[in-house]
Image (spheres, grey):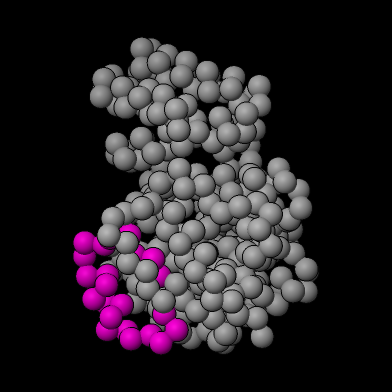
Amino acid sequence: MEKIGLVTITYNSEKVISAFLNCVLKQTYDNFNLYIIDNCSSDNTLQVLEKENISRLKLIINTENFGVAKANNQGIIQAFKDGCSKVLIINNDVEFEKDLIKKLIEFQNQKKCSLVVPKMMYYSDPKYIWYGGGWFKKKRGFLPSHRGLNQLDKSQLDKIIAVEYAPTCCLLINKQVFDDIGLMDEKYFVYFDDTDFCFRILKDGRHKIYYYPFVSFYHKVGSLTKSFKKNDSNKYRGDFFLKQNSMNHIYFLRKIGSLFSYLYIFWLFFRNNIRFIFSSRIKKNFNTWWLINYSYFKGLLK
């Protein structure tokens, strides 16, 4: 039985971590280590973890918030040092069935593929799909799209297929992928870290991501990353989101390095300024306009 490393990042995760640990400890596949990387939580996350007293838990406590990509890398590196042959990068604002690890590994070994991602449902509304496969949309600046987003689940996406993009809310990855592609790009503090990783896999061509829908997995779409659900799509996401998302999209496009990607960067600058001047739907908020433009320039200089 192969040894697996479950890698998850906590940051003020007090309200969700106990339910996550409950799901982990019920797994029928038991040859795993759990790597929790705490990014300097200021709530009671660490106290909750201490009370759980889990023998297979390996806790890495950061003295500052290093961001998602670097924290994931810390867990991945430690897992492979400890002899794991695969890692399951997983959020802790999720709940899942007891056979999650078993089913993903069995499918991966049967298919002889390098990466496996499950179908993901909204925890708050489990009849609706959050992720049913993903692809990059060139016309949207290579942004990834979630197939089936907000669709009522009628088993219409219950077919195993190869996909281009998978969120690292739950992604099983063989060690060889990191040997060939490299680790997560630590210049992404949050957002686009999984986008960049999957695009590098696609561009490299040696590994494929397979979507496996026959497992129960529910995502409590977080307050930090925000929901793409229809009811939330028009909410103001705050300066943090605007800065990170704008900056990282530009950096991602610059890394692609094609003529199209550079033209798209120019288009984003142009569109943002035209909207600020002419759009009746967007309030003429100078601070927001400045933040987006400033973030675009930061992305170019990363």
Q: Residue at x 55, y 86 (%)?
A: 30
Q: Residue at x 54, y 76 (%)?
A: 82
Q: Is residue 43 magenta?
A: yes
In the image, taking residue 239 as reference, residue 195 lies left or right, namely right
| Quadrant location, the N terminus | bottom right
Q: Nearer the viewer, residue 105 or 15?
A: 105
| Quadrant location, the C terminus | top left
Q: Nearer the viewer, residue 143 or 11?
A: 11
In the image, taking residue 40 as reference, residue 251 lies left or right, namely right
Q: Is residue 249 magenta?
A: no
Stretch in magenta: 36-57
Q: Is residue 121 visible?
A: no
Q: Residue at x 46, y 37 (%)?
A: 248
In the image, taking residue 72 as reference, residue 44 lies left or right, namely left
Q: Check the image and report above or below for 44 versus 234.
A: below
Residue 241, image x, y percentages: 36, 40
In the image, taking residue 162 as reference, residue 267 lies left or right, namely left
Residue 108, image x, y percentages: 71, 70
Q: Nearer the viewer, residue 263 or 134?
A: 263
Residue 48 lies in quadrant: bottom left
